[in-house]
Image (cartoon, grey):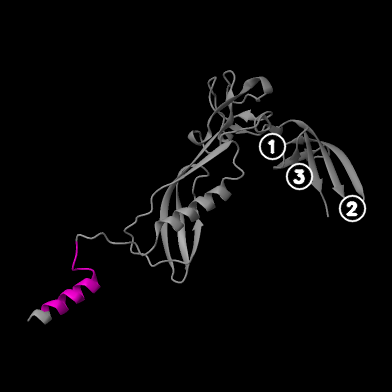
Amino acid sequence: MKSVVCHLLSVLALLGLAHPSQPAFARQDPAPVRAEVARFLKIQSHSLPGEVSIQVGDFASDNVLPACLQLEAFLPPGSRQWGRLTVGVRCLAPSTWSAYVPAEIRVKGVYLVTAAPVVAGQIVGPNDLRRETGELSAQATDVLTDPSQAIGYAARVSLAAGRPLAASHLRLPPAVVQGQPVKVISRGAGFEVANDGTALSTASDGQGAQVRLSTGQVVRGVARNGGFIEIITP
C-alpha cells in the first residue's frame, strides 16, 4: 500500500498537482517579450518631434505560451502614433502565437496654438500663430508643429485664442474660384499655349477644375495657385 501511495505522489508531482500552493512558472519568459516591444517602439518613435519616453506595460508572468526563440513586434491596424497603445507580439519560431502588450509613448515638444481668435475661412498668417512647449501626446494626433504646415491655409472652423492647431482645422485656400477670370495654359511636347477663360468650379491647387474658354469651349484641367488652369496634352 505504501508503494502505491508513493507512486501516486510521484505522478502528481510530475503533473504539478502535488503542491498546488506553489506558483506556476511561465513557459514564455516576459522579459524578452517586453524587450522586443521596447526595441520596436524605439524604432517607431525615432522620427517623432520632441523628447520621447517609452513605457512598456506588464506581460503576464503566468502565461501558458510556449517559449519562443524568434519574437516580432507589430502595431495593429489603426494604432495611434503616440499616447497609450497596444503592441502586438508574434512568435515566429519554433511555434506560432500572438499576444498583446500595453505601452505608452510620451512626447514632449513644441506645437502650434492660435495667437488670437481665428474665424472660419480666414487665411492663417504668421501673426496668427505662436509656439508652445508641452505634452504632444496629450494633443490631437494631427496637431501641427511647424508654421509652414499652417501659414497660407484657410480655417475650416472658428478657433479661440490659445487653441492647439490641428491639420483637421485647416484646408488649402482655393487656387481658383467659380466665376473667376483665369489663365488657361495648355502644354504638350514642344509647345505651350495660353488662353483666357472663366472658372466654372472652385478648386484648390492640384484639384481638377472646369473652365470656359473665351471661344465658349468648356475644357477641364488642373487648378494651380495664382489663378490659372493647367492642361497637359500627350
Give the CA distance from mark 3 to mark 1: 12 Å
Helix, strand or loop at label 2? It is loop
Give the image location of residue 157, x and y in percent: 55, 27
**Residue at image point 53% right, 52% down:** 39
The answer to whether mark 3 and mark 1 are in CB contact below 8 A is no
Query: Which of the two discs, 3 and 2, labels the residue nearer the N terminus?
Result: 2
Highlighted magenta segment, given as a residue range: 5-20
As drawn, the label of residue 100 is: none
Helix, strand or loop at label 1? It is strand
Give the CA distance from mark 1 to mark 2: 26 Å
- Who is closer to the viewer here, 18 or 151? 18
Q: Left or right: 94 with respect to 207? A: left
Q: Quadrant of the N terminus?
A: bottom left
Give the image location of residue 73, x and y in percent: 50, 57
Query: Which of the two discs, 3 and 1, labels the residue nearer the N terminus?
Result: 1
Q: How busy is the neighbourhood of tag 3: few (under 14 within 10 Å), some, or many (20 plus)?
A: some
Q: Which residue is mark 2?
A: 189
- Who is closer to the viewer here, 117 or 208? 117
